[in-house]
Image (spheres, helix red, strand yellow):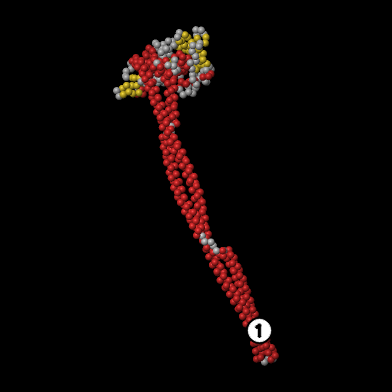
């Protein structure tokens, strides 16, 4: 199979570009940023199309990357020859694969050909797009040396069993996904520890609540006993010791005392006024008597003297009579009032003492009632608190039960998933062992081809391939991975491995090989040897070698 020519309508930055190819080595030299990689991707897209944009693999993100810069029809055509027949494949690309156009023309009949479908690459080379990319397509700066299961099946001869490699890959993928899902669903050990710690905390809380409940129950019992004893020892207050009655009695007595004090004051005032008048009368009588005496001594008329003397005598008699009477009656009245006042004071004092006694007893009774009320209040509060604690205890017991059930469930799930993961691990191990056993068929042939290419490059050293075709360096200190090789050396051995892969994988139809300037890490000597190898390799394979400088060409 070989490519004869191509036409690019619009693809990335390339526009209306044509190129004719020859057998063997085709060197295409253009400056950096001309579009060499774009050309390589276009050739690949003509055979394999382009997947949806945004996929994770680099070659699947090419649809949007190589959309025409200048607009216009996205695509082109390519003429190739296979089995002595020439075809022209035409593809145009839309934003999604559903809008893509594919046409295959038989150039001998100029009619649409049904020899191949839109899956042109798969049908021509009997490998998928990924296998094509890791074998015949040497991308710049990314000489991938890994293999996939399709390559493995071709190398081992298992490809004769249609779909086995794909089934194996799907099975391994499903098993790994299942193992990962088990890992995700399995409770982590720190989560189990967290549950255990939480349960211990809840149990400690429960123990504290039970202690509070016990103490509160004892306190309630003590309060109830104290209230009972207080009610039994309570003495009723006598009915006549009513403080209101005594207070009213005291008020009445004080009113009576006030009235007596008013009467006594009035009487004493009255007596004082009467005495004043009597003493005035007494003074007048004495005056008249002195006057009568003076008249008699002066020899005045005896009649006048006798009259004045008589008046003085009468006045004295009146004075004596009224004075004796006033003194006797006034003294009796005042003494009587004073006695009543004294009796009232005694009664008031007695009532006040009784009120004090009643108040003292009432205060004691009030104090006792207040104390009892406080105890009743505390009893009610304690009973409410007791119910709250009992509710908390019930809720906590239920929560602990749920946590313990969840813990057991988690531990059981961990055990079950661990068992399942162990089974998956064993199955994967058996599958890998079976694959390795199958891979042993191609390791030796691949190693021989690989060694042949290395010898042509005059490379020395014990470089080996394992069943995964990983490059290993066999040294006196042990086997080392290819990361211990320099970049140039690593690229060199990887290219040799890829050349060996192409010869081993493509048995029916020899593919073209695209070298997108892959020798950038090689020194002058290695580059010269590699170009000689490429020149020799091009005798059996059509090679499209894209470079940016003539120094990289032979």
- Quarter of the picture containing the C terminus is top left
In the depicted view, which residue is nearer to us: 484 or 155?
Answer: 155
Going 36% across and 18% down the picture, which residue do you hit? Answer: 440
Going 49% across and 19% down the picture, which residue do you hit? Answer: 50
For disc 1, the neighbor class at 10 Å (few under 14, some 14 to 19, many from 20) is: some
Q: Can residue 491 be seen in this view?
A: no
> Dot 1 corresponds to which residue?
318
Seen as rendered, the residue at the extreme left is 476
In the depicted view, which residue is nearer to us: 244 or 129?
Answer: 244
Vertical placement of residue 129 versus 320, above or below:
above
Going 46% across and 24% down the picture, which residue do you hit? Answer: 56
- Quarter of the picture containing the N terminus is top left
Vertical placement of residue 310 versus 437, above or below:
below
Task: Measuring from the top left, give residue 530's x and y in whole percent.
Answer: 37, 15
What number of labels is visible?
Answer: 1
In the depicted view, which residue is nearer to us: 360 or 100?
Answer: 360
In the depicted view, which residue is nearer to us: 493 or 234?
Answer: 234
Task: Measuring from the top left, give residue 123's x and y in whole percent.
Answer: 46, 14
Q: Determine the secondary structure under disc 1.
A: helix
Seen as rendered, the residue at the extreme top is 108
Going 32% across and 19% down the picture, which residue do you hit? Answer: 462
Residue 474 sits in which quadrant? top left
Residue 354 sits in which quadrant? bottom right
Seen as rendered, the residue at the extreme front is 232
Q: Can residue 475 be seen in this view?
A: yes
Task: Measuring from the top left, give residue 515's x and y in whole percent.
Answer: 42, 16
Task: Measuring from the top left, give residue 117's x and y in whole percent.
Answer: 49, 14
């Amino acid at each position: 199979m070989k490519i004869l020519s191509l036409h690019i309508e619009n693809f990335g930055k390339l526009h209306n570009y044509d190129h004719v190819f020859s057998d063997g080595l085709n060197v295409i030299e253009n400056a950096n940023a001309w579009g060499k990689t774009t050309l390589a991707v276009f050739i690949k897209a003509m055979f394999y199309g382009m997947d949806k944009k945004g996929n994770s693999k680099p070659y699947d993100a090419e649809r949007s990357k190589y959309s025409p810069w200048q607009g216009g029809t996205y695509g082109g055509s390519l003429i190739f020859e296979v089995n002595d027949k020439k075809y022209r494949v035409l593809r145009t690309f839309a934003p999604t694969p559903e809008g893509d156009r594919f046409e295959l023309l038989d150039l001998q009949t100029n009619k649409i050909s049904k020899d191949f479908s839109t899956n042109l690459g798969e049908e021509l080379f009997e490998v998928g797009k990924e296998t094509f990319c890791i074998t015949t397509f040497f991308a710049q700066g990314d000489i991938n040396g890994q293999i996939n299961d399709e390559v493995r099946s071709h190398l081992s001869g298992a490809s004769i069993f249609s779909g086995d490699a794909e089934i194996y890959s799907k099975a391994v993928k499903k098993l790994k996904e299942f193992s990962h899902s088990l890992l995700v669903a399995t409770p982590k050990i720190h989560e189990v520890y967290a549950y255990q710690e939480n349960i211990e905390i809840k149990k400690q809380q429960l123990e504290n609540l039970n202690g509070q409940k016990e103490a509160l129950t004892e306190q309630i019992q003590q309060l109830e006993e104290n209230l009972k004893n207080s009610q039994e020892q309570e003495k009723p207050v006598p009915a006549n010791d009513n403080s209101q009655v005594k207070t009213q009695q005291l008020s009445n007595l004080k009113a009576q005392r006030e009235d007596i004090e008013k009467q006594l004051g009035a009487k004493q005032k009255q007596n004082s006024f009467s005495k004043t008048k009597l003493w005035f009368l007494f003074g007048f009588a004495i005056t008249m008597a002195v006057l009568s005496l003076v008249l008699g001594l002066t020899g005045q008329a005896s009649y006048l003297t006798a009259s004045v003397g008589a008046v003085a005598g009468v006045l004295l008699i009146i004075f004596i009579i009224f004075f004796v009477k006033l003194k006797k009656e006034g003294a009796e009245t005042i003494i009587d009032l004073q006695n009543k006042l004294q009796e009232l004071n005694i009664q008031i004092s007695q009532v006040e003492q009784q009120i004090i006694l009643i108040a003292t007893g009432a205060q004691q009774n009030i104090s006792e009632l207040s104390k009892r009320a406080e105890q009743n209040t505390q009893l009610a509060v304690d009973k409410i608190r007791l119910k709250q604690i009992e509710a908390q205890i019930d809720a906590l017991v239920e929560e602990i039960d749920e946590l313990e059930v969840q813990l057991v469930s988690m531990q059981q799930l961990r055990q079950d998933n661990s068992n399942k993961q162990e089974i998956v691990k064993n199955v994967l191990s058996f599958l890998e062992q079976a694959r390795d056993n199958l891979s042993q068929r191609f390791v030796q042939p691949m190693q021989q081809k690989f060694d042949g290419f290395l010898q042509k490059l005059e490379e020395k050293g014990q470089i080996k391939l394992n069943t995964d075709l990983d490059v290993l360096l066999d040294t006196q200190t042990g086997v080392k991975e290819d990361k211990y090789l320099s970049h140039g050396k690593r690229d060199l051995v990887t290219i040799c491995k890829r050349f060996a892969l192409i010869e081993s994988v493509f048995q029916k139809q020899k593919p073209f090989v695209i070298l997108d300037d892959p020798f950038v890490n090689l020194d002058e000597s290695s580059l010269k040897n590699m170009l000689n190898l490429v020149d020799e390799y091009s005798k059996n394979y059509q090679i499209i070698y894209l470079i940016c400088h003539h120094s990289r060409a032979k």
